[in-house]
Image: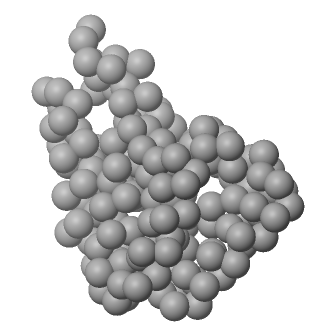
Amino acid sequence: MTLDALNELSPEAFLDVMGGIYEHSPWVASAALPFRPFPNLPSLQQTLRETVDAAPLARQMTLIQAHPDLAGKLARAGNLTAESTREQAGLGLDQLSDQEYLLFSELNARYRERFGFPFIICARKHSRDSVLAAFRQRLKHDRDSEILEALRQIHDIAALRLGDAIHSGS
């Protein structure tokens, strides 16, 4: 879809297109509606980002909690969003051996226990090895640093999803 077409959509249709850009968080897209028309994709992306960054911590934490574990039970059961399924499959996380699955499960559990929310990383910018390295490195961080890092990763994920959904032009 073009940005021009997105700008012309009804609010309901806009939310249908944009509601999944931020995982299970259509409130982000809804908050962007009054700012239409967007002159370009970076402007739309910035509006979405500012919406999240200006949200109260409780709302940001709800957004963080909306993300699934990497290669977790939801993925194995086929219960991820279409976007998350594609992103995790891009790393081959849908084809892990039992041993690899156990490693991811252990790291997910350690991370959740330490920080109280899922490990979030922009899978499309990583290899399986770099994800594992990031898991191990980020387990050393404090909670506040990890909240900020999770939000950075969410913004990266959203930017790529937005680029997939919308392109500039008429």
Q: Report x, y in % for residue 144.
A: 30, 86
Choose between 161 and 141: the one closer to the eye: 141
Which of the 4 quarters of the picture holds residue 27? bottom left
The residue lying at 36 percent from left, 84 percent from top is 141
| Position of residue 116 in the picture relative to residue 3 (left or right) | right
Q: Residue furthest top?
A: 170
Q: Report x, y in % for residue 75.
A: 74, 56
| Relative vertical location of residue 46 with respect to residue 142 in this rendering, above or below | above
Quadrant of the rendering where the N terminus is positioned: top left
Q: Report x, y in % for residue 115.
A: 48, 87
| Position of residue 121 in the picture relative to residue 129 (left or right) | left
The residue lying at 69 percent from left, 59 percent from top is 71
Choose between 34 and 46: the one closer to the eye: 46
**Residue 137 visible, this angle:** yes
The residue lying at 25 percent from left, 42 percent from top is 45
The residue lying at 60 percent from left, 85 percent from top is 110
**Residue 63 visible, this angle:** no
Q: Report x, y in % for residue 131.
A: 51, 58
Which of the 4 quarters of the picture holds residue 69? bottom right
| Relative vertical location of residue 25 with respect to residue 9 in this rendering, above or below | below
Quadrant of the rendering where the C terminus is positioned: top left
Render colour scheme: one colour
Instruction: Tally the marks.
Output: 0
Choose between 156 and 97: the one closer to the eye: 97
